[in-house]
Amino acid sequence: MTFKYDVIVIGAGHAGCEAAAASANLGSSTCLITMDMNKIAQMSCNPAIGGIAKGQIVREIDALGGYTGIVTDRTAIQFRLLNRSKGPAMWSPRAQCDRGKFIWAWREILENTPNLHIWQDTVRRILVDDGEIRGVETVWGVTFLARCVVLTAGTFLNGLMHIGRVMLPGGRMAEPASYELTESIAAQGITFGRMKTGTPVRIDGRSVHYEDMEVQQGECDFHKFSFLDNGVRHLRQLPCWTCFTNDEVHEVLRQGLPDSPLFNGQIQSIGPRYCPSIETKIVTFPDKPQHQLFLEPEGETTRELYLNGFSSSLPMEIQIEALKKIPAFRDLVVYRPGYAIEYDYFDPTQLKHTLESKLVRNLFFAGQVNGTTGYEEAAGQGIVAGINAHINCHGGEPFTLGRNEAYIGVLIDDLVTKGVDEPYRMFTSRAEYRILLRMDDADVRLTEKSWKLGLATSERYELLKRKREAIDRILSFTRGYSMKPALINDVLEALGTTPLRQGCKLAELINRPQVTLLQMAEHVPALKRELDTITDRKEETIEAAEILIKYEGYIGRERIIADKLARLEAIKIKGRFDYNSLQSLSTEARQKLTKIDPETIAQASRIPGVSPSDINVLLVLCGR
């Protein structure tokens, strides 16, 4: 049997869902192929979305017209805004979600998306003719012909799970691995490797002594993930809890190290350095007497709990014995032990910034198959791959995001320029322009781009226009309204800030860390009337305006730097040089430039091993 589509998406994880929804919403006939329709957008590790830098990515996906933020808001059971004590460039939303409801919310969206079909099956090989993708073939013998294919297979490619010395094939616990597909892709000259990740034990909440733990409550204010004015507020707040390991726990874990696949040679691949297993923690930090653990709910009605910080591949009896040394878990009952999983990934330096393969036309890669980890990183790649797959089918300019435009742009540029030697996770420190890539302005940065593509809806675009207009009015008012010392000094002293000696503009007062727009509105009737004209997303809009006032200098300076570096982005060099013949370049630079074949001078400057002197050589040659 044969079916024909514009776009085929392999895998219905977070990357696959966003890719399929994007291509279908843009008008491409799309088929999403998944092993199990009941595991669509499964959160195989912690059922949480967001966190440091990850939360910004989800806001960007939403601004582009994706669904991860919407689904998160609908299914959140605890919401928090992290890093409130720091500047707004570091603020990051995070939500614990109901795992089961998350799946069904995504499935409801996908099943009601025009142009999108879902097929339950496993892809065994890709079909390529003359260097161009033609479709895929499944284990059921079905052929899907397509103009573009997006691979988002996650950890399923030759997946192998480890619990102590026990090894089981699988892409997730109780789910089969995918075989033959890696070999089919590698036959096209695309290189691949192995990576490892892990997940912790799942606990029966009825066995926990919560009185021996510290409770961690959620937050309920106007913050959320989606920019849509959908009326969602995170009113359902379940608690999380924290506790610590101790010396007794560590001693039991040390006894199990000879049977740990991470230390006995059973696992050869590299795992995420920033999210180590508990056995790696006690080996790497032998003098640390304790490690913090976070106990987090998996849903509103289930007793299943996730023990964040205790990822492990040790034998299950060691895991349970060690945990019982913690007072809160002295009567521990578990649903399943933690395990590690090895899987195949493909070298992302063989991709363009559109996430299309350089070796097979119209074949796209997104998610963990590119060496990343995390739902958010996967979803961000997925929406970009889905957009570009549609463009390749129907025409248009490639859609890419710069490092000064989005964390998604930083993520993809890092992948295709630097490659990976461990599972890649986004951090705020990876972005040069953090002040420009805040969570509050993702819609300002990206929604108009997406609206012009036809992905972001008119509703989103109208909301953006009203937000911009409201912010402009607030900025204009505060910059033009004069404040007199006699009218405001008592208020300033009460707020703990220096009184005025002479008059100033209201914006100068808002610039002070102790002063907010809402505080001033209580004492400046004209400002209150101005703020009351905001009809939707009032609190969010006021916050965004206040950030622009308080950080105007920092934002301006960073934009100047970004604009200067953007000039190097405009110097196209792809296909202009035979790098191996340029003896004035270092040997390493010749090798790296030949492998990556960068699009621009700016991209070349970010390749590890390409020095400033090498860039100067290229600039001179470009001048000639």
Image: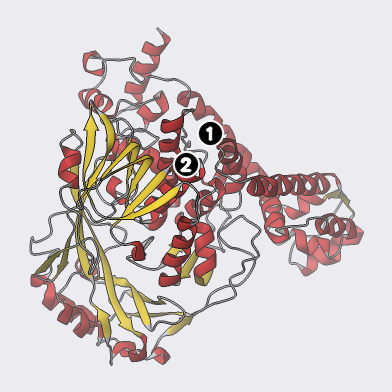
Q: Which residue is mark 1?
A: 562
Q: Position of residue 537 (x, y in %)?
A: 70, 58
376 sits left or right of 471 in the view: left
Per the image, label 2 sits on a secondary structure element best described as: loop
Q: Position of residue 183 (x, y in %)?
A: 15, 43
Per the image, label 1 sits on a secondary structure element best described as: helix
- Quarter location, residue 272: bottom left
Q: Name the quadrant of the C terminus.
A: top left
Q: Which residue is mark 2?
A: 432
Tell me if I can see residue 522 in this picture.
yes
Disc on the earlier residue, 2 or 1: 2
What mark, if any, has residue 114 been given in the picture? none
Marks 2 and 1 sit apart, C-alpha to C-alpha, by: 9 Å
Residue count near mark 2 (Cα–Cα under 10 Å), binned few <14, some 14–19, many ≥20 = some
- Quarter location, residue 450: top right
Residue count near mark 1 (Cα–Cα under 10 Å), binned few <14, some 14–19, many ≥20 = some
Identified at 38% across, 54% down, the residue is: 118
Q: Nearer the viewer, residue 23 or 196?
A: 23
The amino acid at mark 1 is: Ala
Q: Position of residue 521 (x, y in %)?
A: 82, 61
117 sits left or right of 470 in the view: left
Tell me if I can see residue 380 in this picture.
no
